[in-house]
Amino acid sequence: MVEKKFSKAKSFNKTNISKIPENKPIVYLFKAENNKKLYVGMAKRNRAQERLLEHLMKKGEKIPGTKKFQILQFDNMEKAKKTEKRLIKKLSPRYNEAGN
């Protein structure tokens, strides 16, 4: 299996979120200013921008210290889910529950 590469890190703001493609499922990675990995998540096709805006805007969805984000696009949800799970296990981001 060829390892996909995350997009270039972008500042976590509405302008950059609005540029995310919506045509495929994504896995996203939130990072702190020092590039520490904080959270790995996934969004369905046609919901990527909405999902990231939830993290930016909603109090209960915010990941403290998030300054940058990166994404990976997938052809289907099954691949995205497997990759999300694998990355959480590999990276152990601070705000993901252990083992999920």
Image: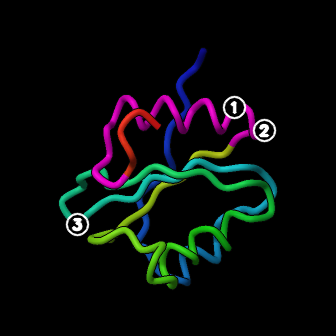
**Local secondary structure at mark 3:** loop
Image marks 2 and 1: residues in contact by CB distance under 8 Å: yes
Most foreground residue, 16 or 96? 96
Reading the image, the residue beneath label 1 is 79
In the rendered structure, find residue 33 and report the number of the disc placed on it. 3
Q: Is residue 79 magenta?
A: yes
User: Of the residues shown, which amino acid type is indicated by label 3?
Assistant: Glu
* Circle count: 3
- Taking the spot 46% from the left edge, 76% from the top edge, the residue there is 60
Q: How far across and down, in percent of the image, does residue 73 sit? A: 66, 46
On the picture, is 53 further left or further right than 63?
A: right
Q: Quadrant of residue 33?
A: bottom left
**Local secondary structure at mark 2:** loop
- Measure how far apart labels 3 and 2 are at the Cα level: 30 Å
Circle 1 residues within 10 Å: few <14, some 14–19, many ≥20? some
- Taking the spot 27% from the left edge, 71% from the top edge, the residue there is 65
Is label 3 or label 1 in front?
A: 1
Q: Quadrant of residue 16?
A: bottom right
Q: How far across and down, in percent of the image, does residue 15 sit? A: 55, 83
Most foreground residue, 45 or 23? 45
Is label 2 or label 1 in front?
A: 1
Q: What residue span does the magenta drawing correspond to?
A: 74-95
In the rendered structure, find residue 75 and report the number of the disc placed on it. 2
Query: Is tag 3's residue or tag 2's residue first in the polypeptide sequence?
Result: 3
Placement of the N terminus among the 4 image quadrants = top right
